[in-house]
Image (spheres, rainbow, N blue to C red):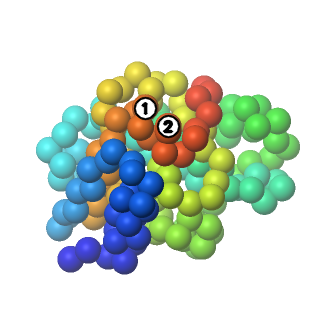
Amino acid sequence: MMSRYEDKLKWYIDENNIKAEHLSFKQSCHSVEEAALTANANSDDFVKNICLITSSDNLVVAIVKGEDRVSTTNVAKALNSEKIRVATPEEILQRTGYPCGGTPSFGYPAMFLIDPRVMEKEMVYSGGGSENSLIKIAAEELQKANNGRIVRIRK
């Protein structure tokens, strides 16, 4: 059964003519490992959307490959920002309109930063709006959809 979050994301994709495939599953796709098994895909093809809050209270979404970790130092440098912290699950839901674990790479107001390693992939899988869904999208299309800045943000 589709969640209202998945419906909202599908609507956004259609409304904005984003070339992406929305995939819905019965199993959880919360972790990269679970998602790769569920989607029968290579874990190397997954990206994570890490929601961060700047000291001036702005939402920043750091998009890195599934196996990479975000460096808050690199993100702060890229933004010339004082301090950055990881958003709580409540803040993620409140600010993106999507639950933690299903947060998509676009579709809500935020500043998006994309690690260059993401752009090396032709196709990537990203959060599909809920823990049981994914989006399959070309890396270039993903950047177009969120107007993301390509900058090294991984550790």
* Mark seen at residue 87: none
Q: Identify the residue at image location x=44%, y=40%.
A: 142
Q: Is residue 133 visible?
A: yes
Which element is circle 2 on?
helix
Q: Position of residue 139 (x, y in %)?
A: 40, 33
Q: Answer left or right for 72 relative to 115.
A: right
x 44%, y 26%: residue = 119
Badges 1 and 2: C-beta atoms under 8 Å apart? yes
Name the image quarter holding residue 132.
bottom left
Task: State whether residue 86 appears in this view.
Answer: no
Within the image, what quadrant is residue 129 found in?
Answer: bottom left
> What element does badge 1 sit on?
helix
- Disc 2 target residue: 143
Closest to the observer, 132 or 18 = 18
* Residue 135 percent location from the top left of the image: 32, 51
Type of the residue with mark 1: Glu
| Real-space Cα separation, disc 1 to disc 2, in angstroms | 5 Å
From this view, report whether residue 107 is shown above or below residue 7.
above
How many C-alpha atoms fall within 10 Å of the one at disc 2: few (<14), some, or many (≥20)? many
- Quadrant of the image for the N terminus? bottom left
- Residue lying furthest top: 120
Relative to 96, is 141 above or below?
above
For the point 54% across and 30% down, the residue is 115
Q: Is residue 98 left or right of residue 147?
A: left
From the viewer's perspective, tell me whether residue 29 is left or right of residue 57.
Answer: left
Tell me the amino acid under the disc marked 2. Gln
Mark 1 burial class by Cα count in 10 Å: few <14, some 14-19, many 20+ = some
Looking at the image, which is closer to me, 135 or 117?
135
Q: Position of residue 92 (x, y in %)?
A: 57, 65
The C terminus: image quadrant? top right
Label drawn at residue 140: 1
> Foreground: 31 or 47?
47
